[in-house]
Each structure stands twice: as C-alpha cells, then as structure tokens.
Amino acid sequence: MDQIQQLLRVSKRQYGHPPSGVWAAPGRVNLIGEHTDYNDGFVMPFALAERTLVAATPRPEETWTVYSTNVDEQVGFGAEELVPGMQGWQAYVAGVVWALREAGHPVAGAELTISSTVPVGAGLSSSAALECAVLTALVDLYRLEVPLLERAVLARRCENEFVGAPTGLMDQAASTLCTENNALFLDCRTHAYQQVPLDLDAAGLELLVIDTRTPHTHVDGEYAERRGTCERAAAVLDVPALRDVEDLGEALKQLPDELMRKRVRHVVTENERVLQAKAILADDTLPVTERFARLGPLLDASHTSMRDDFEITVPTVDLAVETARSAGAIGARMTGGGFGGCIIALVPRETAGKVAAEVADAFDRAGFRAPTHFVARPSAGAGAVALN
Ligand code: ADP
Ligand code: MG
C-alpha cells in the first residue's frame, strides 16, 4: 500500500472519518553552502522525494489532536498550552499553530495524522518537513493568505522560538519553495531566492546520499564555537557578517590567529563556491553534462574546506567521500552541519551501485558501522496532495 493510502487508513482509524485533505512537505539535502547561513551568506539545497504527509480535518474548538505513525503516538494540546519551550515531538506541530497565531492568522483546532518517509535525525530535515507539512495544511484548511516565503519564515520561527533550535532559514525554505528538478539558491541575508536547474536525468547522473550513521557527538558545542568564532572574526574585520568580506587575502592578514583565519577562509570561499555553482548550473550556453563536470570540483573543494579549515568532518565522513571519489564520483562532499551525518556523491547513473558498494566495503574494512544510501531526486516543495 502506498504512503497516502496507508495514511488515510490510519487517519480513519484514529478519528472515525476521512480527513478533509492530505498535504505533503519534503526533506532536503544541501547541495553546497555549509555554515554560510549564519554568516548572512548563500546556500543551495534541493527538496527530496522523501516527504512528510499530514492528513488534516479542521475542528471549531481550539484543541489539536495529532497522531504520528513514525512514533506511533497520539498527543493533544489546547490553546493554553501553546507556550514556547514545549517538550516532545508535538512541539513541532504546536509551534506551527503558535507561529501562525502570533502572526495574526486565525487558526482554530484540527485533527492531524502524520506519516513521514524522511529519515528522522539524519540531517535531512525531518523537522522542517513536519513543520512545513502542518503549516501548509493549516493555511489551506483555514483559507489563509500566507505567501510562500512567509510560510518558510513562520515554520522557522516555530523551530527557533517554540522548539528552541537555533537554525537558519534553509530547511524551511527548501521544504516550502523548491520545485522539481531544481535546486534553490537562497541568500540568507535578504531571503532573495532563485530556482537553479539541477537536471540530473538529462546528464545521465545521480546524486547519491550516503548516511554514515555516525552518532553525532558534541554537535551543539562545536556549532556554538564555530558560530562564535565567525562572529568575533567579523567584529575584528569590522564587517556586519563574514558575507561582507571582499578581499580574503587582506582579511586574513588582519586576523589575530590561525584558527580564526581557517574559519574565515572556509566561510568566504564556501560563499564563493555557492555563487559559482549557481552560475554554472544556470548557464544555458553550457551543455548540461559540462555544467555538472564543472560542479564536481566545487563539491570536492567544499569538502576539503570543511575538513581542513572548518574542521567539521569526522573519519567516517572523510572515508565515504574519498571512497566515493575513487570509485567514480564526479564530486563528493559532506552535507549538513557536520560531525557525522550524510555525504552526497555526484555519480554517473551506471556507477551509482558500485560507488555505494565500495563505500560499504571500505566501512567494513575500517570497522565502521554499515552505511545506508539512497538516490536523491530533486522534488517539489510543500503542497496539497491529490487523492486520485
Ligand atoms: P532532522 O531535522 O535532521 O531530521 P531534528 O533533530 O532537527 O533532525 O528533528 C527531528 C525531530 O523532529 C524528531 O526527534 C521529532 O521530534 C520530530 N519529528 C520529525 N519527523 C517526525 C514525525 N514524522 N513524527 C513525529 N516527530 C517527528
Ligand atoms: Mg532538523
């Protein structure tokens, strides 16, 4: 049975009647642009085919009931419980109701059923998929006028202020604004965005996502340290954010220590790589195979910069990237905040199986936990799901 039919069945079982509708929002992977968001820089994610579905029915009373098939749990909350800091997975749902109401949108109660194919906690943004699916459902159920970018901003507010996770706009923007066969270029300062062609099929390529399944450790502390160092560096350089560094060579001379120089070099060159990737992929004077041939080295350089300058990779991630490259990937890099998580490898379609198998072999030989993998398909952002 497919995901939608299964969801409808569960929803009927929970509430005794069919829902008013079903909505979906995808997970995402970042093609390039890591740790650039909080430096007011550029990112370029794309939405996955893996998505979170929400079956929803409005309810006049201000109470919400939510069942998630992923955790097999039903929770409920009333309007008086819509207070930032709520614990548990329901915070991602309640926070969306809260953010909409804070912004003045009249949202009453709902019955919700959730089912997701986005791996939870793997850095593919199941959290934004959940927020954006619920938000899209409520916007449609209550016939609200909320422009797409504003939806992403509200879903981010849920995550930042209600759940309490200090993330940038990338995840919610990708889950809301992406379109099929495109990546999304996002300027994290101005929130200007642009669809960038990512037609892998036309080039005979696939983007393989390999999950190293490395347990994340010390991530919060390391993230705070990187962020703090970037902020101090911007202050030394007397710029609002590292995005504003114009001459890297000059900037490096002004910085007091090698650690800060490395961190700044990553951010400045990574922003440059995102801009180059956008220009290359959008250049319709280049054959599509040539565009990807030029993207590959940018992915590789991004990884090297994360490994040597920003120092956010770990042995499993480096091994996966190196093995993917030697097995035939055109380019490969860690994706996500670091210290574990997934890598992406740009591979000729016929080589994908070999690349995945060689990474698995290398992990086995190194005594690492077996990785998992799937093929990422650049997909559409959140919306209503047609029920036939
Ligand atoms: P990521 O976004 O990388 O998957 P996060 O830690 O940001 O990881 O978000 C994962 C959390 O989001 C889960 O621990 C859970 O609280 C919530 N969540 C995501 N998807 C679901 C779902 N389908 N059902 C219930 N909770 C979910
Ligand atoms: Mg998340």
Image (cartoon, rainbow, N blue to C red):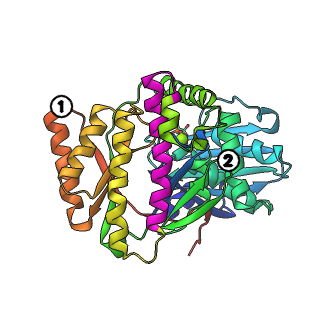
- The kind of residue tagged 2 is Ala
Viewer-proximal residue among 293 and 1? 293
63 vs 263: above or below: below
Q: Tell whether 270 sits left or right of 83.
A: left
Tell me which residue sits at (33%, 70%) in the image.
290
Q: Main secondary structure of the magenta part?
A: helix
Which disc number belongs to residue 177? none
Magenta-tinted stretch: 254-281
- The kind of residue tagged 1 is Gly
Q: Tell whether 348 sits left or right of 142.
A: left
Residue 252, position in %: x, y? 48, 32
**Which picture quadrant has residue 193?**
bottom right
User: To which residue does mark 1 refer?
Assistant: 367
User: To which residue does mark 2 refer?
Assistant: 155
Mark 2 vs ligand 2: CB below 8 Å: no
Tell me which residue sits at (66%, 44%) in the image.
156
Residue 381, position in %: x, y? 57, 62
**Can you see residue 72?**
no
Q: Quadrant of ligand 2?
A: top right
Mark pair 1, 2: CA separation: 40 Å
Residue 277 within the segment the image draws in magenta = yes
